[in-house]
Image (cartoon, rainbow, N blue to C red):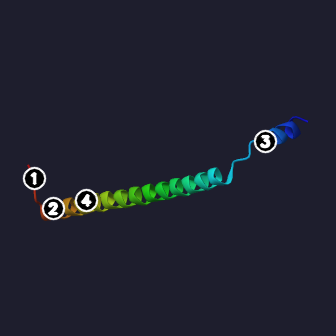
């Protein structure tokens, strides 16, 4: 009974067409922003990983060559 009453109450809350268009556009833009943020974050992390790997490789080669840094 509670579910039926809740569903009836929601039917009254219909959005007009312009409001629905705005809501859909906003949701799509939000999703695109989130995807762009994730993509940029992954790229930033991959670049940082590559930078750290290059440093580790250089340290390893220096160790093999007997180079001491002060």
Q: CA distance from mark 4 to mark 2?
A: 10 Å
For the residue pair 34 and 20, the one nearer the viewer reads as: 20
Q: State the quadrant of the N terminus.
A: top right
Residue reaching furthest to the left: 70
Q: Secondary structure at mark 1?
A: loop
For the residue pair 37 and 30, the one nearer the viewer reads as: 30
Query: Which numbered disc covers residue 62?
Result: 2
Q: Which x, y percent locates residue 64?
A: 17, 64
Q: CA distance from mark 1 to mark 4?
A: 14 Å
Residue reaching furthest to the right: 1
Q: Secondary structure at mark 4?
A: helix
Which mark's residue is nearer the viewer, 3 or 1? 3
Query: Which numbered disc covers residue 12?
Result: 3
Q: CA distance from mark 2 to mark 1?
A: 9 Å
Q: Could you tell which of marks 1 and 4 lies nearer the N-terminus?
A: 4
Q: Secondary structure at mark 3?
A: helix
Evaluate if marks 2 and 1 touch, with contact meaning CB atoms under 8 Å apart.
yes
For the residue pair 32 and 43, the one nearer the viewer reads as: 32
Q: Could you tell which of marks 3 and 1 lies nearer the N-terminus?
A: 3
Q: Which x, y percent locates residue 15?
A: 69, 48
**What residue does disc 1 label?**
69
Q: In this rendering, is residue 32 above or below 8?
A: below
**What residue does disc 4 label?**
56
Left or right: 60 with respect to 13?
left
Which mark's residue is nearer the viewer, 3 or 2? 3
Q: Secondary structure at mark 2?
A: helix
Q: CA distance from mark 3 to mark 2?
A: 73 Å
The quarter holding residue 37 reads bottom left
Residue shown at 55%/58% (left/top)?
A: 28
Q: CA distance from mark 3 to mark 1?
A: 74 Å
The quarter holding residue 50 reads bottom left
Disc 1 crowd, CA 10 A, few/some/many (<14, 14-19, 20+) = few
């Amino acid at each position: 009974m509670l579910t039926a009453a809740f569903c009836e109450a929601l039917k009254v809350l219909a959005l007009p067409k312009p409001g629905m268009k705005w809501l859909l556009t906003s949701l799509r833009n939000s999703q695109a922003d989130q995807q762009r943020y994730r993509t940029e974050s992954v790229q930033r992390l991959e670049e940082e990983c590559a930078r750290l790997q290059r440093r580790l490789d250089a340290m390893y080669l220096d160790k093999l060559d007997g180079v001491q840094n002060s």
